[in-house]
Every structure is written in C-alpha cells, then in structure tokens.
Image (spheres, helix red, strand yellow):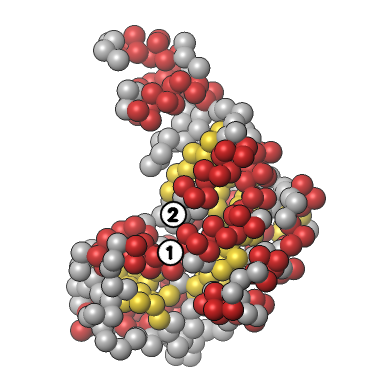
Amino acid sequence: MNQPREDRIEFLIELEPAQVMAQYRSGQVTRRDLSKLFAALGLTAALGPTIGRSPALAQSNELTMIVWEGYSSDSLRIPWEEANDATVEATFASTGDEMFAAMQGSGGTTYDMVSASSDLPQRLYDAGLLMEIDPTKLTNYPDLYEQFQKPPYITFDEKLFGVNFAWGPTILLYNPDEIAEAPTSWNALLDEQYSGRITTWNYPLQIGQYALLLDPKPEDPFLLDDEQLAQVKDLLVQQRPLIRKYWDLGGEVAELFQNGEVVIGDGWSWITLQIQGSNGSIAEASPEEGVTGWSDSWCISSEAANPELALKWADYMIGPEGQMGVIENLNYSITNSKVVETLPTEVREQLRMTDVPAEYAKIHMWKFIPNYDKWVQVWQEATAS
C-alpha cells in the first residue's frame, strides 16, 4: 500500500473487517493505521501483543481472548477452528492484573473471553465484566469433578460465571547440571550462592508464595495482616540484589535457563516442557513449606460479541480433546473425571490425579485478596531497582 496515510484510512474504511485484519497480520497495515481507522470510525481499541477486537471489526466467526501462554497453542486451537469454521485471536497476558486492566479498559468489548485464574473472577464480576454461564449448554459439564462444577471462585450469588478446566501448583525449577541436589525450600530463591542467577515471577500475588517462609507460617498465605506483609517485604528486599530478572512471560524463563543466565526460579510445568523441547536441562521440586497454585476457568465477557462461540470453546476445553490437549501441551492437571479415568497410572500420579480432591487440597490456591492494593504497594516497593 503506497497511498498517503490519509488515503489509506479512506481505503480501509471501504474494506470488510476480515480484509482489514488480514492486511494487519500480513504487515500491510500498521498498528498506527488501525488506531487512525478506529478513530475515524469513532471507536477506541486496546492494542496488545496481538490486536484487540474493536466492535466494528468483530466477526461472527472470530473468537477473541486474553489468555495465559499455551492455552491457544496450535494443537488445541486448530482442530476447534476447523470443527467450528471459526478463528481464534489470542493475546497473551503476563499476570491477572494485566487481564483485568485489558477487560476493564474496554468495558469488556475487546475480548470475548479470558482464561482467569482463581484470584481474578471476583474482580471481574465486581466490575460487571462477566456473563453468567448456563451449564446446561455445556455438554461436557456433567463429567467435571463436583468440586470444579461450581467452585466459589467462579460462583457468585449462586450463579456460575466460569468453566473450570485446569489446575496445578507453582513449583521450583532448577538446572540439575548446576544444582546437583534438589532444593527443598523456597529459601533457595534467597540463597546467596545463586546470586545473580535467580528468577521469580513479577506479580504481587507472589507475596503468598514467600509468605510460606514466615514463622509462624500463616494458615492462609493469601490472607495476611500488615505485620505479615511487612515481614514478607523484608524477605523480598533481601532477595532483590540476588535476582537476575523478574520474569513476566513463561517464555522468558525458558530462555533464561537455556542461555545459562539463571539456574533456579519459580514457574510451572509448561515452562519445563518448553525447556525440555529445546534440549535444555531442567528439573522440578516441590518445597517442604508447601506450594501455591491456580485453578483456571474460561470466563466470558458480559459484552462478548460472540458469546455462543465462547461457550463452544469452553465446552471443547473441558471435553476429551481439550483436556488431553491441556495435559500434552502444558502438563497441567485437569477437571474432567471421565478423562482422568482413561489416563495411565503413571500420568495420574505425575499430575496429582490419583485422588483429585486430596491432592487439590494440598495446594494453597490463589484467591481474591481483599487488601490487594497493599500487596501491590509492598511488591512494587520491595522489587524496585
């Protein structure tokens, strides 16, 4: 396209939405062009790692979502797209805070759905950003373990606002070529012998993980008083000069390990698979103090352009194909009891699914934090360079 910029915008206005997006993805249309186009149409748009949907560019066969890395991988996405004659446009987020900001900033119009971990749905619901879900429209819903059908983190006023599809712990990751003996404590992330080679997730919610090191250990690491928050802050300030990088996306962690920049950090099994896939050296450990963890649900925006398509995706992700995709792509635990029953014993043991209720109860699951503003302040002050 060699037209002057003003002519380009006039040209784009005449195109079908699908043609505009195709030219954006091919590089013929810039993000600036799209911003000017939206402005000319009297619209606003959130432009993230991938373009957010503007109402004028919404398509009946396009599903937009903001997700954790891995939840829109090709082996999950492509079969569903082909079966539903639809396309998925996914934006990766590094934290639940980022997801909330993206949803709130557009009033819920930018994304049809979000892969919300158990700390996030309450915030979205309170902001009026979630659509109630009718479980009778989900063919695979009856196959979920009872505890995942209407858990408290997606059930408000006795109504369902999410579809629970995966769960698991945050664990220690380490390079066994550099650390011969598996670490047994979260204190390893404050060990001076690894100075400059430690990485930890850049998210205030991580305060809960480090709260497990307090003495006495809080019964619930996500319900901390001011004194406990001050104690965790002291730990984080002690840790700050030892950190190589506070990571945002899982891909960063994999790269840090592969490049030899770090030898120990926190993360998830999905990151382990990424490193192993590049022939990197990595191992996992579960600290003796216990672990925090997440239970992820597909939540649909109250202003979703394609709510029925979103329901189809959520149903697919709790069905056999989607659940096996979660295991194969991410090595995460799943919520469909019938799928779990088909798994080999060694897989069930590896993924904490020999006794799902008991294993789930061992994890301090992320939850809504009433005084979260204080957590944010503590994290920012402790980790600032």
- Between residues 58 and 42, which one lies in front from this camera angle? 58
Helix, strand or loop under label 1? helix
Q: Is residue 43 above or below residue 298?
A: above
Image coordinates for residue 318, horizontal then vertical, percent: 65, 56
Q: Is residue 110 above or below residue 168?
A: above
Does residue 4 appear to the left or right of 86 in the view shown?
left
Residue under label 2:
69
> Looking at the figure, which quarter contains the N terminus?
top left
Q: Nearer the viewer, residue 32 or 172?
A: 172
Q: Is residue 32 visible?
A: no
- Residue 240 pos. (x, y %): 26, 72
For the residue marked with disc 2, what is the amino acid?
Answer: Glu
The reply to whether the C-beta atoms of the residues labelled 2 and 1 are less than 8 Å apart is: yes
Q: Nearer the viewer, mark 2 or mark 1?
A: 1
Residue 212 rendering spot, x and y as whole percentages: 46, 82
User: Residue 270's mark?
Assistant: 1
Q: Residues within 10 Å of mark 2 (few under 14, many from 20)?
A: some
Question: Type of residue at label 1?
Answer: Trp
Q: Is residue 118 above or below residue 210?
A: above
